[in-house]
Image (cartoon, coloured by chain):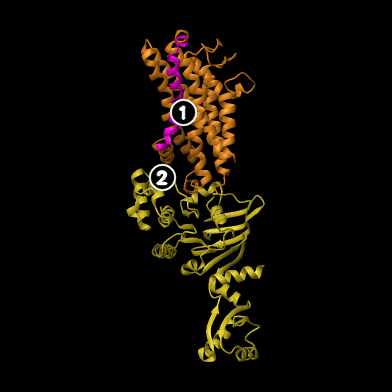
Chain colours: A yellow, B orange
């Protein structure tokens, strides 16, 4: 049986008293996996553990079946890692930097340079090859980081907040590149706290919070879990009392609140029937505006965290 | 070893060329300045002559002051910056064994130290050459001092690399080990002298630059004598052996080192 690209067993990392990651059990890949969580949730710690930059305090991380540690070097050629921080060898030219990294994998100088040029072309920065890093914009520096991860077209890409600072066109290009990588059998672990970006390329997600696994799986499955939780809908309507009476009669809401500014806040465990009902009433029924704050991934995350707390 | 050469060349370009090399060269030229003043002193010229000033005055200065400070100015930032700023992540996530990374750092660091140290060795000679009656003996001393400095670069660079990979406060440890234990304890009489690589460098300096192993006062001798001076063979074994040991410890440190 083929080992999954990523496997963690009881993986923990502590920074003194601070918990970076705690007891993570995870199997992931192939395909694109969104690694979601707010700052400090353990995404970067997990990335660093997976590519051997830090050592686990407890547990094991495996890449393609090889435990992270001294033996990891064998599989490092199959990994491309893009760090989350904006760090570079500042005074180096983009192509020199990429050529060096290619030559560290044993390439001859000419071949390393060619690799560097190809990687720059992948992120559409060929015209900046001879520019020093410290003269490039943040978005360009971000693309250089992605380029170095792509140098050898690795099977597993570990991308830590790769879209930070990128302009919309570059974002779209990188997201396309990620999807293309997954289509050809590769694996991408994409860490982000900008959730709609992850949602654009995958429905397979891992949610971390305070170093712990909060949820894992397909986004629709997580959504269905969330659908069982009470949800809040805010309505701007002209005759709320009559509507509320009808909703309570049909058992579609479990809580009602009239706010001082005239809004009506409904709490429900039956989101879909309630939405269908409200849609049927529409403007003719006096509803001017409807806000559902929990329709995106961000609110799902918030609800999960709230549920856990 | 393509990877080691590539990494070494990259680090050499960063710290051994461009503007980065100017401050170390300025420090390395201090013995030349001292030699220039000394060559103007009739007493010193009568007592030591140009050859004596080069061997007995400039030689110990280059060895005990320039070499350790150049090590701290060049090797320490070269090794510490990538580890502390996190840029080492780019190097350590390549399919490259960490001992090769250590060797690459060592190669880059020693190469980057070479240019200022060459200035330190040649500077006083150029100043003293007009006052030197024969070029041959001066050339021999230049080669002698050059050889000692070259051999001294190896343990000091590897020691600094070890400090950078193993310790959390590398600057403090480097000052303690390179300056206090290396340069100072290795130059003065005391229990630590035999443990310091500097003692063996001094012995080689005496052998190769004709520096007296006696204390004859500040006008004639500038290094504290060693009552049981080690021979050349032992010096070479100790210097090369300590280099290998420090590199080994640097490798162990690099394996355990977290890149945050």
* Residue hosting label 1: B27
Task: Give the Cα distance between marks 2 and 1.
Answer: 24 Å
Callout 2 touching callout 1 (CB < 8 Å): no
Q: Residue visible at 54% across and 53% down? A: A48
| Boundaries of the magenta span | B19-44
Q: Is residue B119 left or right of residue A266?
A: left
Task: Please tell me whether residue A228 is drawn above or below residue A153 in the rendered image.
Answer: below
Q: Position of residue B258 (x, y in %)?
A: 57, 47
Q: Is residue B31 magenta?
A: yes
Task: Please tell me whether residue B86 is drawn above or below residue B15 in the rendered image.
Answer: below
Mostly what secondary structure, the magenta segment? helix
Identify the residue at the far top of this view.
B46
Q: As rendered, which of A205 and B109 lies closer to the eye?
A: B109
Q: Is residue B85 magenta?
A: no
Dot 1 alpha-carbon crowd within 10 angstroms: few under 14, some 14 to 19, many 20 or more: many
> Can residue A218 be seen by looking at this rendering?
no
Q: Residue visible at 60% across and 54% down? A: A60
Q: Are marks 2 and 1 on the same chain?
A: no
* Residue hosting label 2: A91
Which picture quadrant has residue A257?
A: bottom right
Q: As rendered, which of A68 and A301 lies closer to the eye?
A: A301
Which picture quadrant has residue B125?
A: top left
Chain letter of the residue carrying label 2:
A
Q: Is residue B127 left or right of residue A284?
A: left
Q: Secondary structure at mark 1?
A: helix
Q: As rendered, which of B47 and A72 lies closer to the eye?
A: B47
> Looking at the figure, which quarter contains the C terminus of chain A?
bottom right
Chain letter of the residue carrying label 1:
B
Q: Total label count?
A: 2
Q: Secondary structure at mark 2?
A: loop
Q: Position of residue A292 (x, y in %)?
A: 55, 78
Q: Position of residue A104 (x, y in %)?
A: 43, 45
């Amino acid at each position: 049986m083929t080992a999954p690209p990523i496997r963690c067993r009881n993986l923990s990392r502590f920074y003194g008293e601070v918990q970076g990651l705690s007891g993570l059990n995870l199997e992931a890949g192939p395909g694109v996996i969104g690694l979601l969580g707010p700052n400090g949730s353990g995404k970067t710690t997990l990335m660093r553990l997976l590519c051997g930059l830090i050592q686990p305090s407890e547990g094991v991380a495996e890449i393609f079946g090889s435990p992270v540690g001294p033996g990891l070097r064998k599989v490092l050629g199959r990994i491309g890692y893009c760090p989350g921080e904006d760090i570079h060898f500042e005074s180096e030219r983009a192509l020199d930097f990429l050529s060096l990294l290619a030559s560290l994998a044993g390439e001859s100088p000419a071949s390393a340079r060619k690799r560097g040029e190809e990687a720059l072309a992948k992120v559409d920065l060929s015209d900046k090859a001879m520019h020093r890093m410290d003269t490039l914009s943040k978005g360009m520096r971000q693309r250089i980081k992605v380029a170095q991860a792509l140098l050898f077209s690795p099977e597993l890409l570990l991308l830590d907040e790769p879209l930070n600072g990128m302009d919309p066109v570059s974002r779209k290009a990188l997201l396309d590149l990620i999807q293309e990588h997954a289509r050809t059998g590769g694996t991408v672990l994409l860490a982000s706290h900008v959730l709609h970006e992850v949602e654009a390329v995958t429905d397979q997600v891992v949610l971390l919070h305070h170093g712990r696994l909060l949820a894992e799986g397909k986004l629709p499955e997580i959504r269905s879990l969330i659908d069982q939780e009470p949800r809040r809908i805010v309505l701007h309507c002209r005759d709320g009392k009559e509507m509320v009476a009808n909703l309570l009669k049909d058992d579609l809401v479990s809580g009602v609140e009239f706010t001082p500014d005239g809004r009506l806040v409904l709490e429900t465990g039956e989101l879909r029937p309630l939405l269908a009902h409200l849609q049927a009433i529409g403007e003719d029924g006096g509803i001017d505006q409807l806000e559902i704050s929990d329709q995106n991934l961000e609110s799902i995350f918030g609800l999960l965290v709230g549920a856990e707390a | 070893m393509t990877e080691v050469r590539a990494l070494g060349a990259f680090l050499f370009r960063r710290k051994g060329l461009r503007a980065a090399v100017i401050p170390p060269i300025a420090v390395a030229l201090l013995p030349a300045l001292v030699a220039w003043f000394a060559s103007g002193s009739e007493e010193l010229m009568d007592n030591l002559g140009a050859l004596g000033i080069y061997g007995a005055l400039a030689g110990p200065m280059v060895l005990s002051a320039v070499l350790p400070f150049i090590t701290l100015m060049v090797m320490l930032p070269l090794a510490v910056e990538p580890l502390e700023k996190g840029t080492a992540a780019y190097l350590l996530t390549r399919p490259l064994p960490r001992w090769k990374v250590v060797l690459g750092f060592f190669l880059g660091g020693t190469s980057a130290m070479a240019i200022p140290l060459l200035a330190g060795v040649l500077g006083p000679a150029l100043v003293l050459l007009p006052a030197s009656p024969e070029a041959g003996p001066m050339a021999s001393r230049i080669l002698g001092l050059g050889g000692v400095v070259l051999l001294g670069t190896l343990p000091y660079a590897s020691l600094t690399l070890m400090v950078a990979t193993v310790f959390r406060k590398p600057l403090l440890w480097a000052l303690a080990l390179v300056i206090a234990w290396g340069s100072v304890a290795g130059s003065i009489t005391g229990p630590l002298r035999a443990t310091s690589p500097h003692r063996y460098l001094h012995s080689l300096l005496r052998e190769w630059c004709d520096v007296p192993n006696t204390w004859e006062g500040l006008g004639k001798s500038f290094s504290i004598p060693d009552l049981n001076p080690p021979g050349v063979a032992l010096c070479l074994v100790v210097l090369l052996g300590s280099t290998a040991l420090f590199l080994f410890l640097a490798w162990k440190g690099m394996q355990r080192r977290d890149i945050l």
